[in-house]
Image (cartoon, rainbow, N blue to C red):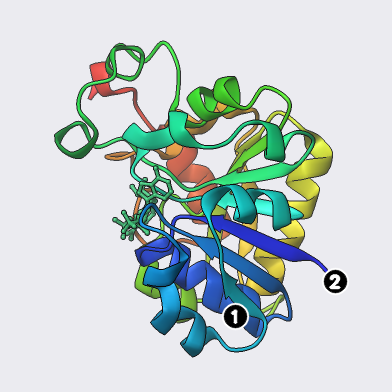
Amino acid sequence: MVTIGLIGAGKIGSQLARLAVAHGYDVAISNSRGPETLTALVEELGSKARAATVVDAAKAGDIVVVTIPLKHYRTVPVEPLVGKIVIDTNNYYPERDGHIAELDNESTTTSELLQAHLPMSKVVKAFNHIYAAQLTTDGRPAGTKNRRALVIAGNDLAAKTTVTRLLDEFGFDAVDVGPLKEGWRIQRDTPGYGPQRTAEELLKDLATAKRYADQ
Ligand SMILES: NC(=O)c1ccc[n+]([C@@H]2O[C@H](COP(=O)([O-])OP(=O)(O)OC[C@H]3O[C@@H](n4cnc5c(N)ncnc54)[C@H](OP(=O)(O)O)[C@@H]3O)[C@@H](O)[C@H]2O)c1
C-alpha cells in the first residue's frame, strides 16, 4: 500500500489528500500547528487518512508532497526524505514570501531551491498551476477528449514517470517540461499558469513563456 505524505494541509494539501484517498492511497497529512489542528480534515477524509507531525508525514510517505508557503521551504525535514520522490507544488509570491534574491534575478527556480535543500531526494514540480478547487472537479478519465493537462518538471526520469502515473490516476494528462531548471516556464504570470489547458495547448504556452525580465 502506497502512503502519500503531505507537508502542508491548506488549500492544495487538503485537496491532494482528498484525491489520494479517493484513489486508494493512505495519507499522512501535516501542517505547521500540529496534528491536533487537523481533526476535522482527517474525519472528513476517513479511515485511510491520519494527521501527523511534519517529520512523521515525511517518514510515513512513500511519496511526499511539499505544499506550503515557499518562504518556509528550509523547514522541510531533510533526512526522512532521503531517496524519496518529493512533489513540490510551491510558487513564489514576494508579497507573501518576501524577496528571495535568486528568484528575483532568475538565477534559479522555486523547485531547484527545494531540490538544493533536499539533495538526496527526487524533487518533481507538479500541481503548481491549477487552482486548488479544480483539483477535485477537473479530473477526467484517460482518453477523454480535451482532458486537462498539468506540467511536471524534474531531474529524475523514473520519479517523473511515477508522478505522471499519479496525475493520470487523479484525472490529468502530464506534460513534461524537462529538468527543474525549466520550471520557470510555468511560474506565476506565464501563459500556462492558471487556465485549463489540454496537453497540446500547454505545450504552446510553455514554448511562448517569457522570463520576468522579458515580460
Ligand atoms: N491555492 C492554490 O490554488 C494554489 C495552486 C497551486 C499552487 N499553490 C502553491 O502551493 C503552496 C501551498 O498553497 P496553499 O494555497 O495550499 O496554501 P495555504 O492554503 O496557505 O496552506 C498552507 C499550508 O502549509 C502549512 N504550513 C505552513 N508553514 C509550514 C511549515 N513550515 N511546515 C509545515 N506546514 C506548513 C500551513 O499550516 P498551518 O495552517 O498550520 O500554518 C497550511 O496547512 C503555495 O506555495 C502556493 O503558492 C497554491
- In the image, taking residue 152 as reference, residue 90 lies left or right, namely left
x 24%, y 34%: residue: 97
Give the distance between the C-alpha atoms of the residues marked 2 and 1, in whole angstroms.
24 Å
Seen as rendered, the residue at the extreme left is 95
Q: Secondary structure at mark 2?
A: loop
Image location (x, y in percent) of residue 145: 60, 78
For residue 133, above or below residue 58: below
Name the image quarter holding residue 147. bottom right
Whether label 2 touches label 1, CB < 8 Å: no
The mark lying in front, picked from 2 and 1, is: 2
Image location (x, y in percent) of residue 17: 55, 71
Amino acid type at mark 2:
Met
x 50%, y 80%: residue: 42
For residue 9, above or below residue 101: below
Residue at mark 2: 1
Mark 1 is surrounded, within 10 Å at the Cα level, by few (under 14), some (14 to 19) or many (20 or more) other residues, namely: some
Amino acid type at mark 1:
Arg
- First-in-chain label (2 vs 1): 2
Q: Is residue 206 in view?
A: yes
Residue at mark 1: 140
For residue 161, above or below residue 214: below
Q: Quadrant of the N terminus?
A: bottom right
Question: Is the CB of the residue bearing disc 2 within 8 angstroms of ligand 1?
Answer: no
Residues 51 and 162: in front is: 51
x 35%, y 65%: residue: 11
